Structure formats: structure tokens, C-alpha cells
Image: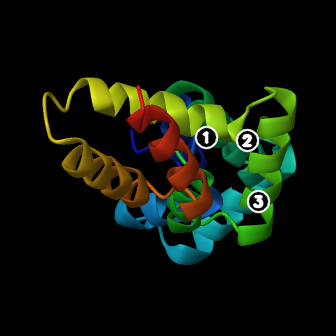
Amino acid sequence: MAQTPYNRALDLLSARPYTVRQLRRKLVQKEVPADEAETVIQRLLGAGLLDDERYALGYARSKLVGQGSSVRRISQELARKGVSTELSKQAIEQVVIDEEIDTRAVVERVARKKLASMGDLEPVVLRRRLFAFLARRGYEMDEIREVVAAVGKT
């Protein structure tokens, strides 16, 4: 028996959370006609089973607390997933407040972890590579300068 588009969407959501854009794309990939996919999405939104705001909060919490990702990186990833800039900004700010995250401490923790894996290098080379690593991860330049100066001395 063929699955209805709604049940297919519920199965997808039971496996992992999706943004509206991701679920729409996935349903179309599963050969659900676009108008039916839109109807299913509206039904899920109405039932509270699909919520970009809740998705953004969970994603930001996971990345900030668990992985120490930068605010910029999280914003970019949420944008790729279809979350609006305003919504991602609000979610990140909410997580920083709720979890009492000190973003500078996060950068320092990531820097110290990287530093431990870099081995014996000349201090100048070490600082340059650490700076480049943190910049690629999307941290703010001012924070990077402070942290590299602080951890480079130890």
C-alpha cells in the first residue's frame, strides 16, 4: 500500500527534525507533487509538528554548547537550511542567554584544543596557524586576536 504524502512527511520527521525548506525539498525528491507537498507542510505547520523557530533553537543549542561553533558559522548553516536571518539571529541570542554562554570562553576552549594537537612549532608559526584555523571556523577577528594572544603565551 502506497504511503500518503502526509504519512511520508511524518516518517521523515520521526527520523530527524527538518526545516520547512528541507522537508519541502525532501518531499519533492520523493516524487510528491509540489502542490501536495505544500498542503502537507501547511498541515504540519498548523499542527505544530514543523517549526523553523524550534529547529533553529535546537540546532543553535547543539552547535554552541556541544561543538563550540561560532555564531557566524551557525547563522550560515541555518541560512543554508532555509531559516531566515532574523529567526537564526533570535535563536542564537536566545541560546546564548539561556545557556549563559561566554562566546570568548568558547573561542578559547576551541583554540586550546587545537593548540594541543599542533605539536612543537615555532611560536610565530603556531600563532599564525591558530589564527587561520579560528578564522576559518568563523569567529570574530577581535575575539581571535585576544584569544591567540592569551593562549599563545601559555
Q: Secondary structure at mark 1?
A: helix
The answer to whether 79 is drawn above or below residue 43 in the figure is below
Q: Earlier in the sequence, mark 2 or mark 3?
A: 2
Disc 2, disc 3: CB below 8 Å? no
Q: Secondary structure at mark 3?
A: helix
Which circle marks residue 59 in the picture? 1
Q: Secondary structure at mark 2?
A: helix
Q: Tell me the residue that label 3 is attached to.
A: 89
Which circle marks residue 57 in the picture? 2
Q: CA distance from mark 2 to mark 3?
A: 10 Å
The answer to whether 64 is drawn above or below residue 109 in the figure is below
Mark 1: give few (<14), some (14-19) or many (20+) Cα within 10 Å. some
Q: Quadrant of residue 152?
A: top left
Left or right of 36 on screen, residue 122: left
**Residue that lies at the very extreme toward the bottom in this rendered image:** 35
At label 1, the amino acid type is: Tyr
At label 3, the amino acid type is: Lys
Q: Does residue 5 appear in the picture of this structure? A: no
Residue nearer the viewer, 123 or 96: 123
Residue 140 position, x and y percent, is 58, 60
